[in-house]
Image (cartoon, rainbow, N blue to C red):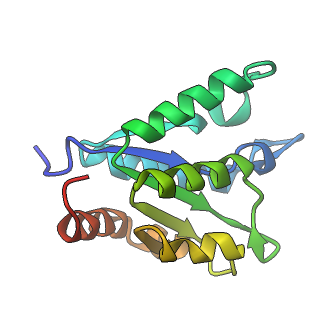
């Protein structure tokens, strides 16, 4: 059993703005997110993911805003680490309102945060989260070349902090 097997990880990222009417969820982003989840689960971690529950945006969530908010808030309260997947679109982070709310929850609850992002500049409040929270960053391209980087960052967080 892996030393990470008891960890609970909440993976957030764009859903609404990663969809196109013609093709559903952006295929490359879906593959990348699925790889993130698979790497964590291969280590025995429990993963919370709205992407999975909502089938990458194909489940009709009309009228379920409160239920989704309560679900995601409960996931944040129960997780050990929040992983925010923040891909680029035209040189800027793809809009992901829910993930920004979740970043606020994570930082206010003292949850360590791993930003999986492209090289573009984020928004100031995302870049500035290090001032108030434990934040580690991995470039998406680096993760895709070496998925173990995610596990290494989680180990780094574990070794530098009290149990999370």
Please identify the residue farthest to the left as the structure is shown. 1
Q: In this view, does 151 lie above or below 34?
A: below
Q: Can residue 111 be seen in this view?
A: yes
Tell me what residue is drawn at x 55 percent, y 71 percent.
129
Residue 48 seen in the current view: no
Taking the image as shown, residue 32 lies to the left or right of residue 4, namely right
Q: Position of residue 33 (x, y in %)?
A: 54, 51
Task: Identify the residue shown where x is 78% and y is 77%.
Answer: 91
Specify whether 11 is left or right of 96: left
Is residue 145 found left or right of 116 in the rendered image? left
Q: Residue at x 26, y 52 (%)?
A: 164
In this rendering, the answer to whether 70 lies above or below 142 is above
Q: Residue at x 40, y 56 (%)?
A: 110
Q: Where is residue 139 in the image (x, y as percent from the top left)?
A: 52, 75
Q: Is residue 94 left or right of residue 36?
A: right
Question: Outermost residue toward the right?
Answer: 21
State the image coordinates of residue 63 (x, y, percent, origin top left): 80, 18
Q: Which of 59 and 62 is in front in this view?
A: 62
Q: Which picture quadrant has residue 16? A: top right
Image position, residue 11 (x, y; %): 49, 47
């Amino acid at each position: 059993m892996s030393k990470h097997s008891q960890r609970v990880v909440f993976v957030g990222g764009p859903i609404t703005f990663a969809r196109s009417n013609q093709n559903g969820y952006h295929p490359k982003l879906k593959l990348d997110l699925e790889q993130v989840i698979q790497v964590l689960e291969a280590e025995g971690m429990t993963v919370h993911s709205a992407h999975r529950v909502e089938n990458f945006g194909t489940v009709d969530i009309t009228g379920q805003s409160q239920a989704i908010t309560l679900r995601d808030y409960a996931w944040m309260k129960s997780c050990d680490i929040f992983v925010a997947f923040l891909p680029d679109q035209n040189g800027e982070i793809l809009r992901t309102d829910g993930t920004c709310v979740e970043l606020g929850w994570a930082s206010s609850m003292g949850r360590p945060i791993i930003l999986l992002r492209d090289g573009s500049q984020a928004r100031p409040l995302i870049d500035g989260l290090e001032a108030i929270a434990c934040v580690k960053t991995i470039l998406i391209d680096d993760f895709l070349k070496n998925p173990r980087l995610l596990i290494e960052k989680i180990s780094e967080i574990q070794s530098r902090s009290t149990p999370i």
